Image (spheres, helix red, strand yellow):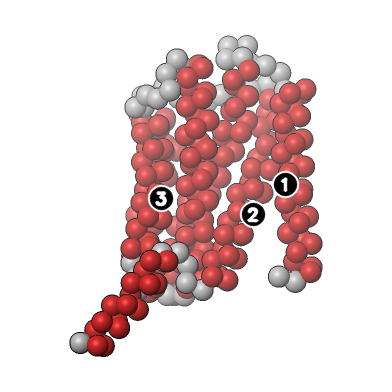
């Protein structure tokens, strides 16, 4: 990494951190408390931007996977797996913050509503995507199978988004916010989006440097051993 890029990376993450601190300060000293839900409602200002950025990360994975199917270039597979990792992380945060909010407001940690069910399915789809990749030794075959899988997995994203509007759900279809609340929500999109895109970029750069992405170390040991045995026989 060049000095200029190193300075740019440091500046990017410093700004992201400052924005998170400023957002937290807004929640404490600026944003009014919601009358019905109380303090727990302030999770919403983090929960919603993370949810939207989960969709963005899934969309990037979808586009990169489609691009790989058309061009068969490794850089697209590297971008797809990088965005899938971030999508899984963000989706985990969405489920966790949603459970905390639900426990306080609805009185239960979990309910099998359409949106929660499709959100859990989304988490499982991308978890499986990352789990199955190391089990495919061939780089080209791994990239192709993963690309097809990711394109199909993305179909769950519109189901998560539209489930509240198409089916009865415990989630509200719309949320009424005071002007100060709207400003806080808009502000929180800045650090969360910067964090999401920064993580995707960092994972992608690491993936490109690694050469052989995420094949397990034991696979690198077993395959040469099998070739040696085959050659000896």
Tags 3 and 1 touching, CB below 8 Å: no
Element marked by disc 1? helix
The image quarter containing residue 206 is: bottom right
Which quadrant does the N terminus fall into? Answer: bottom right
Residue, disc 3: 126
Q: Is residue 75 above or below residue 39?
A: below
Residue, disc 2: 198
Q: Earlier in the sequence, mark 2 or mark 3?
A: 3
Element marked by disc 2? helix
Tags 2 and 1 touching, CB below 8 Å: yes
Inter-mark Cα distance, 3 to 1? 26 Å
Please state the horizontal and vertical placement of residue 9, each as a whole percent of the image.
73, 59
Query: Considering depth in this image, is 226 or 16 the residue closer to the camera?
Result: 226
Q: Is residue 146 visible?
A: no
Please state the horizontal and vertical placement of residue 60, each as a whole percent of the image.
51, 56
Inter-mark Cα distance, 2 to 1? 9 Å
Q: Earlier in the sequence, mark 2 or mark 1?
A: 1
Residue, disc 1: 16
């Amino acid at each position: 990494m060049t000095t200029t890029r190193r300075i740019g990376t440091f500046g990017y993450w410093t700004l992201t951190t400052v924005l998170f601190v400023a957002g937290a300060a807004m929640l404490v000293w600026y944003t009014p408390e919601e009358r019905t839900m109380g303090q727990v409602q302030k999770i919403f200002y983090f929960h919603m931007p993370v949810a939207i950025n989960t969709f963005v990360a899934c969309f990037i994975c979808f586009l990169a996977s489609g691009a790989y199917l058309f061009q068969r270039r490794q850089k697209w597979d590297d971008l797809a797996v990088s965005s899938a990792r971030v999508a899984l992380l963000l989706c985990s945060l969405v489920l966790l913050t949603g459970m905390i909010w639900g426990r306080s407001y609805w009185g239960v940690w979990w309910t099998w509503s359409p949106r929660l069910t499709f959100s859990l399915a989304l988490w499982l789809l991308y978890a499986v995507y990352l789990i199955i990749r190391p089990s495919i030794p061939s780089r080209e075959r791994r990239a192709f199978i993963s690309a097809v899988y990711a394109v199909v997995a993305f179909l769950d994203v519109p189901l998560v988004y539209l489930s509240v509007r198409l089916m009865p759900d415990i989630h509200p279809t719309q949320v009424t916010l005071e002007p100060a609340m709207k400003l806080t929500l808009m502000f929180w999109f800045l650090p969360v989006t910067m964090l999401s895109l920064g993580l995707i970029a960092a994972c992608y750069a690491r993936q490109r440097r690694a050469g052989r992405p995420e094949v397990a170390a034991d696979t690198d040991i077993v395959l040469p051993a099998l070739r040696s045995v085959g050659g000896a026989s």
